[in-house]
Image: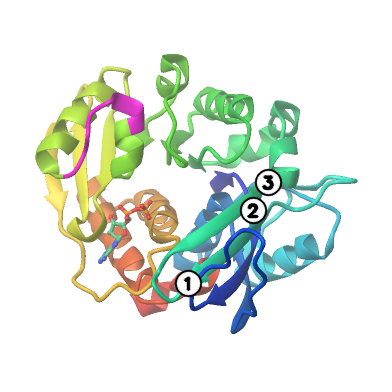
Amino acid sequence: TLLIVGSANADHVLAFSTLPKPGETLMSQQYRLELGGKGANQAVAAARLKTPKQQVEFICALGDDGNARLMRDAWQSDGVILSGCYDIAGQDTGTAMIFVSEKGENSIGVVAGANACLTPAHIVQQQRLFDLASYLLIQLETPIDTVATALRLAKQHDCTTILNPAPAAALPSELLSLVDIITPNETEAQALTGITVTDTHSAALAANKLHQYGIGTVITTLGSQGAYVSVQTDSERYNQLIAAFPVTAIDTVAAGDTFNGALMVALDEGLSMIEAVSFANQASAIAVTRHGAQRGIPYRAEL
Ligand code: ADP
């Protein structure tokens, strides 16, 4: 089983030619409801990209509202198994209000809602899933104690841990020591290490710092440049830039999430690290050519 733990958000998007100023009311040309949240995006990516033999389970917390029902239906039709998905009474499902302008500017407000209610106790209740799981994929949009509990439980069950350290934050070394594979983008690599990451040279310096916490594999995603893989384990030592697929990007929302879901699927299938990163680059290249978060994530047949 591929186990994802994380957040879910309903994104309410209003499009304007110019963003409204404080005190101003403007009519929008368009309203869209997008299903997002890093955890949910990664679960959907894994489900759309998996082989028929693989199973995807998603542990998350939703509110007791219509958005929760909408999400459950959408995820189930993608094949995500929701036995670890909680409905929290009296809470709203995580929500973002997003204003976007024609110039590409945006203005965003987020309510964590039920995402903040996913507790270590919820994780421990799902021991069974950790027992079945070969890989755990987790991010930082749920409480940090919950993330630490999930990583610890995974290690106790011989499950390989992948941390997508997003949104960017500095993290305690105890938490990093529970991670087998970490997948920061440039901003996140900088938040973790203090090193400004823009290219393979700086990515290598940051990766070396992360290896010192005991993380064997550091995959730094570099947007249109691709992904820089640095492996330092007892048995292997190498690094390599895997170039991105040349596409015209129109919306990079969920690029990283697609990358992470795809990486997990490919590693579990038995592909080598380099092959798996190449598969993840392919999947996220398709995602950036489409609008939306979960809407833009490709299906396996499209790769
Ligand atoms: P995030 O979305 O987390 O900021 P990145 O921007 O690094 O992460 O993108 C993640 C991955 O998506 C990259 O490693 C690459 O494979 C793919 N990607 C992102 N932008 C582009 C692009 N313009 N062209 C092709 N692939 C892209």
In the image, farthest residue toward the top: 174
Disc number placed over residue 60 in the picture, else none: 3
Looking at the image, is 27 positioned above or below residue 72? below
Q: Which residue is drawn at 73% across and 63% down?
A: 72
Magenta span: helix, strand or loop, mainly?
loop
Q: Mark 2 points at which residue?
A: 8
Q: Which amino acid does label 1 sit on?
A: Ser
| Viewer-side label of 1, 2 | 1
Q: Give the Cα separation between the discs numbered 1 and 2.
A: 24 Å
Q: Answer yes or no: is residue 55 visible.
A: no
Residue 237 belongs to magenta span: no
The yes-or-no answer for disc 3 within 8 Å of ligand 1 is no
The yes-or-no answer for disc 1 within 8 Å of ligand 1 is no
Q: Mark 1 points at which residue?
A: 101
Q: Give the Cα separation between the discs numbered 3 and 1.
A: 31 Å
Judge from the rendering whether residue 200 lies leftward or rightward of residue 49; answer left or right: left
- Observer-nearest residue: 208 or 22? 22
- Give the quadrant of ligand 1: bottom left
Q: Where is residue 107 in the image (x, y as percent from the top left)?
A: 53, 58
Q: Give, as a single range, the part of the protein colored magenta.
A: 191-198
Judge from the rendering whether residue 287 lies leftward or rightward of residue 109; answer left or right: left
Q: Which amino acid does label 3 sit on?
A: Cys
Ranked by sequence position, the earlier of labels 2 and 3 is 2
Q: Are marks 3 and 1 in contact (CB under 8 Å)?
A: no
Q: Position of residue 181 (x, y in %)?
A: 35, 35
- Observer-nearest residue: 234 or 74? 74
- Observer-nearest residue: 75 or 195? 195
Q: Residue at x 48, y 34 (%)?
A: 159
